[in-house]
Image (tube, rainbow, N blue to C red):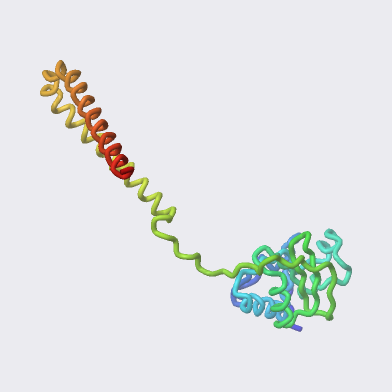
Amino acid sequence: MTTTFYDHWRDVSESNWRWPNFSPAEIACRGTGKLLINEPALDRLQALRDRLGKPLIVRSAYRSPEHNRAVRGATRSKHLDGAAFDIAMTNHDPVAFETAAREVGFLGFGFYPRSGFIHVDLGPARQWGERFPVRESAFAAETPPAREVLADSRSMKGGGAAGVATLGAAGVEVAQQVLAETQEAILPLVPYLDTLRWVLIAVALGGIAVTIYARLDDWKRRQR
């Protein structure tokens, strides 16, 4: 087993780190910043990430002896060897995760549904804890969202609203300019506006009456 110890994860050079989806800070001890690089374990972790095709949220990886005591970890915890990882199930189906983890070579499994993570390590083969409850439907795959109907698109609605607001503001400005320019021409007509209003109302009422008469006439003809 190839291991390398660092007093702090910041001491790791880029040339000594070859796991592209993880960083030294993610794998280092949460309490002290110390880091034990366990290459076989990290190789399997990277293989698991590649197989699942989505991020692995590492809750805990290497633990220094003092930090392990502080969190009341097992005295022979695989975390002390840098050979164990606690992975959050926030973005994973626990069943699919376990299957993939076994396929890449992890042997030890601890299930913590209340805390939302699964512990995996290099062995020996064993498991503990209650499995996650079976979901009514499988965890949704990360697929592109369905194409939105253009009329229902929120972005289109937002753009349309912005356009209407812009046109409305421009229209108000133009109307203000026109009224300002024609105010002198309109003022002489003001005495006649009241009469014009009543004429328009009379025309509107006449139109309504004609419409009602036409509807009644149609109804009477259907009754014949």
Q: Which residue is at the front of the view, 76 or 119?
A: 119
Instruction: Give x and y (percent) for residue 87.
Output: 71, 67
> Residue 75, can we see it?
yes
Instruction: Give x and y (percent) for residue 23.
Output: 63, 69
Q: Report the side of 32 relative to 53 (left or right).
A: right
Q: Quadrant of the C terminus?
A: top left
Q: Is residue 129 above or below residue 198?
A: below
In the image, farthest residue toward the right: 75
Q: Report the side of 187 relative to 81 (left or right).
A: left
Q: Is residue 209 above or below residue 26?
A: above
Q: Which residue is pictured at 81% across the width and 73% down the height?
A: 78
Instruction: Give x and y (percent) for residue 50.
Output: 61, 78
* Number of numbered labels in the structure image: 0
Quarter assignment of residue 165? top left
Q: Is residue 126 above or below residue 202?
A: below
Q: Is residue 216 above or below residue 24?
A: above
Q: Quadrant of the N terminus?
A: bottom right
Q: Which residue is pictured at 31% across the width and 45% down the height?
A: 222
